[in-house]
């Protein structure tokens, strides 16, 4: 039964990703936002819903029994998977052109959010006050992104990544986005629950499940959405989705989870997995600075980075 639910989860994710991309691109045309801004806000929020649901559920299920196994492990593992596996696969499908705004605005915000979360984790617990700070930063950044994009001289009509055949009504585009987010939420829930049951039956430890099965499972929406965007040639949407999703994971998922209940973590996670998360953020910047293009060989390199990380986990 778990294998059937696993297949249904993948199917729901694919359909949900298609609806989310279609609705988001259409909305960009209607409200005057660029595809990058849409990817950094609406799409990122939608594809981060699974991480939020899984992390909150994990904390309340595990209580005081090391909830970092499923919550922090899921967030950190998902961020590593997004910028290595998912971005790598996206670049392999279609080379990703890097816009100036991604370098001067989006990456600094991602790095700043990562460092802020790391600072809060230094005492091995993220408190509710720190969660409020993280979530407040997200609100300010989101408002700034929307206002800046609408006021920008860069019209979506001039965006080469926008499909100009997508001229549906605003309400229909909003419906597509809602259906997409719903499909991603249900699909990821089915995928994670079935994959966790399968992994548990093979005696895989809770932490490894958190940073591999759950992290990969909750990153599948980003993978599907970015892959679909890459196939459509909307690489700005794909890159914005991944960077924005990582920002949302830290500021929203970790922030909201900490507001509900303090989130502890172990020294091992702080000394190893957090370092891997910071390293991939820096590595992606170096790759983006090189000719401002993520080519296929860079994509292969990022995928290999993820495989090394997973191998390290199992060896540990």
Image (spheres, rainbow, N blue to C red):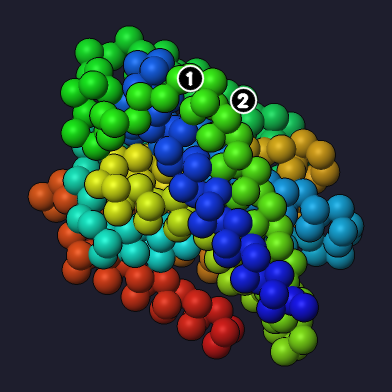
- What residue is drawn where x is 57% and y is 23%? 139
Could you tell me if residue 241 is visible in this image? yes
Q: How packed is label 2: few (under 14 Cα within 10 Å), some, or many (20 or more)?
A: some
- What residue is drawn where x is 19% and y is 23%? 158
Badge 2 marks a residue whose secondary structure is: helix
Badge 1 marks a residue whose secondary structure is: helix
Residue 262 percent across, percent down from the top left: 80, 45
Q: Could you say which disc has been placed on residue 170 in the image?
A: 1
For residue 176, side relative to residue 252 (left or right):
left
Q: How far apart are labels 2 and 1 at the CA level?
A: 29 Å
Q: How packed is label 1: few (under 14 Cα within 10 Å), some, or many (20 or more)?
A: some
- Say above or below: 289 vs 215: above
For label 2, the residue is 136
Could you tell me if residue 268 is visible in this image? no
Could you say which quadrant of the image residue 202 lies in? Answer: bottom right
- What residue is drawn where x is 18% and y is 60%? 295
Q: Which quadrant would the C terminus be assigned to in this image?
A: bottom right
Q: Which quadrant would the N terminus be assigned to in this image?
A: bottom right
For residue 61, side relative to residue 294 (left or right):
right
Q: Nearer the viewer, residue 142 or 14?
A: 14
| Sequence order check, earlier mark of 2 and 1 | 2
Residue 40 percent across, percent down from the top left: 43, 35
Residue 132 percent across, percent down from the top left: 69, 30
């Amino acid at each position: 039964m778990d294998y059937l639910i696993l297949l249904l989860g993948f199917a729901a994710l694919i359909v949900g990703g298609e609806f989310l991309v279609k609705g988001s691109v259409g909305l960009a045309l209607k409200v005057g936002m660029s595809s990058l801004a849409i990817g950094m806000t609406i799409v990122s929020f939608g594809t981060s819903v699974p991480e939020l649901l899984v992390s909150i559920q994990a904390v309340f299920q595990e209580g005081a029994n090391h909830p970092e196994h499923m919550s922090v492990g899921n967030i950190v593992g998902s961020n590593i998977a997004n910028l290595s596996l998912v971005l790598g696969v996206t670049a392999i499908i279609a080379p990703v052109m890097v816009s100036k705004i991604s370098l001067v605005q989006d990456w600094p915000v991602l790095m700043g959010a990562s460092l802020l979360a790391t600072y809060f984790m230094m005492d091995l617990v993220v408190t509710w006050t720190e969660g409020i700070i993280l979530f407040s930063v997200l609100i300010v950044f989101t408002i700034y992104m929307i206002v800046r994009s609408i006021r920008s001289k860069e019209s979506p009509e001039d965006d080469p990544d926008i499909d100009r055949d997508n001229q549906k009504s605003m309400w229909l585009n909003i419906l597509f986005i809602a259906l997409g987010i719903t499909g991603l939420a249900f699909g990821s829930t089915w995928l994670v629950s079935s994959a966790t049951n399968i992994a548990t039956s093979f005696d895989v430890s809770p932490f490894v499940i958190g940073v591999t099965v759950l992290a990969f499972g909750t990153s599948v929406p980003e993978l599907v959405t970015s892959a679909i965007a890459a196939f459509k040639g909307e690489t700005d949407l794909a890159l914005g989705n991944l960077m924005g999703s990582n920002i949302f994971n830290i500021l929203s998922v970790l922030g909201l989870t900490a507001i509900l209940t303090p989130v502890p973590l172990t020294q091992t996670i702080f000394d190893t997995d957090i370092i891997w998360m910071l390293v991939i953020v820096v590595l992606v910047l170096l790759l983006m600075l090189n000719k401002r293009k993520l080519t296929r060989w860079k994509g292969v390199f990022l995928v290999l980075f993820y495989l090394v990380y997973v191998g390290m986990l199992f060896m540990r």
